[in-house]
Image (cartoon, rainbow, N blue to C red):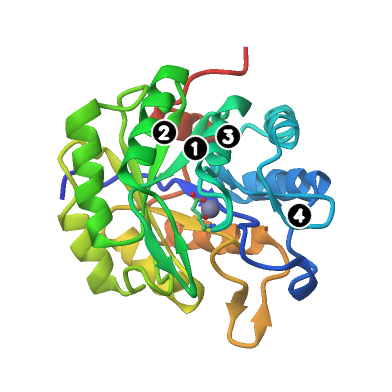
């Protein structure tokens, strides 16, 4: 394993995602007001970073440039969270619109390290797209979070780092997204295989499990020295038969688990230092 186990836990909240319809889940935060309220509550509950997907006025996924900018600004004004914009968007978003997300000048952005079958769809990430996105993050001083949905993505991450060097800031943070139908399974064994394949440049890693993999993957990540991503992008059930009512519930539970494991949540200041994000707050 390349990354040294951390004494604290970065908790990333992914509150919305692009897959769940508002009609199916009225408590999903889809407006700017919802998102800011969610971010404030999740920061208070122990989150250090927010992974953001936007919705339009009809609650559908959007990469609208003005909305992205307004959202980054609002989250910076109302929270101290590291603001990470998704460049994955939805499976229907074109690659050029996904690259343009960086125009909103987030602290961090996601960068998925390969294509994945995604239910009945394909989440497309050809290597030239990844390479261009990565180099743009370096030029624009945005810290990428490398998203790994499959073991092959770990090999592509190694290729990116060996070819283009370290990200802006010098830290390499990756996030295992396990349990997507078509990606690596949401099992401890699969996560541990991914961790053991990480290239030596990786300085920290987190993990999330989709749906019922959420808790087992969180427990495994904590036990193995990693960080956590939670949120309604990944999991809509708090327990069997009990829907998540607010993302802060998932963050609170993750924070409790982290404290129980003697690895309390990192503050936003510690999170910025771990990820080596640029200070864009003046
Ligand atoms: N919505 C998925 C197709 C990311 O945010 O970068 C892609 C995704 C990954 O959620
Ligand atoms: Zn996402």
- The numbered mark at residue 133 is 2
Asked if 100 appears above or below 42 in the picture, the reply is: above
Q: Is residue 155 visible?
A: yes
Q: Which residue is mark 3?
A: 101
Q: Earlier in the sequence, mark 1 or mark 3?
A: 3
Q: Which residue is mark 1?
A: 109
Is the CB atom of the residue marked by disc 1 within 8 angstroms of ligand 1's nearest atom? yes
Asked if 226 appears above or below 71 in the picture, the reply is: below
Q: From mark 1 to mark 3, how far is it between C-alphas?
A: 8 Å
Q: From mark 1 to mark 2, how far is it between C-alphas?
A: 10 Å
Asked if 265 appears above or below 149 in the picture, the reply is: above
Mark 1 secondary-structure assignment: strand
Mark 4 secondary-structure assignment: loop
Q: Are marks 1 and 3 in contact (CB under 8 Å)?
A: yes
Q: Are marks 4 and 3 in contact (CB under 8 Å)?
A: no
- The numbered mark at residue 30 is 4
């Amino acid at each position: 394993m390349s990354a040294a186990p951390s004494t604290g836990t970065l908790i990333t909240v992914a509150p919305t995602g692009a897959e769940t319809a508002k009609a199916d889940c009225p408590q999903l935060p889809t407006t700017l007001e919802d998102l800011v309220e969610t971010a404030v509550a999740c920061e208070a509950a122990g989150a250090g970073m927010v992974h953001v997907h936007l919705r339009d006025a009809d609650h559908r996924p959007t990469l609208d440039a003005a909305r992205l900018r307004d959202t980054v600004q609002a989250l910076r004004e109302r929270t101290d969270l590291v603001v990470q914009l998704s460049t994955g968007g939805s499976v229907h978003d074109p690659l050029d619109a996904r690259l343009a997300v960086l125009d909103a000048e987030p602290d961090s952005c996601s960068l998925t390290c390969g294509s994945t079958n995604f239910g009945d769809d394909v989440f497309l990430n050809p290597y030239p797209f990844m390479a261009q996105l990565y180099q743009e993050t370096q030029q624009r001083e945005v810290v990428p979070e490398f998203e790994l949905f499959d073991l092959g993505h770990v090999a592509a991450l190694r290729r990116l780092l060996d070819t283009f060097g370290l990200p802006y800031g010098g830290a390499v943070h990756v996030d295992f997204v396990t349990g997507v139908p078509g990606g690596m399974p949401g099992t401890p064994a699969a996560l541990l295989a991914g961790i053991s394949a990480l290239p030596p440049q990786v300085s920290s890693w987190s993990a999330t499990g989709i749906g019922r993999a959420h808790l087992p993957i969180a427990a495994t990540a904590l036990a193995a020295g990693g960080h956590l991503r939670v949120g309604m992008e990944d999991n809509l059930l708090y327990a069997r038969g009990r829907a998540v009512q607010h993302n802060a519930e998932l963050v609170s539970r993750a924070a409790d688990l982290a404290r129980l494991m003697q690895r309390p949540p990192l503050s936003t200041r510690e999170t910025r230092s771990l990820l080596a994000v640029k200070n864009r707050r003046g």
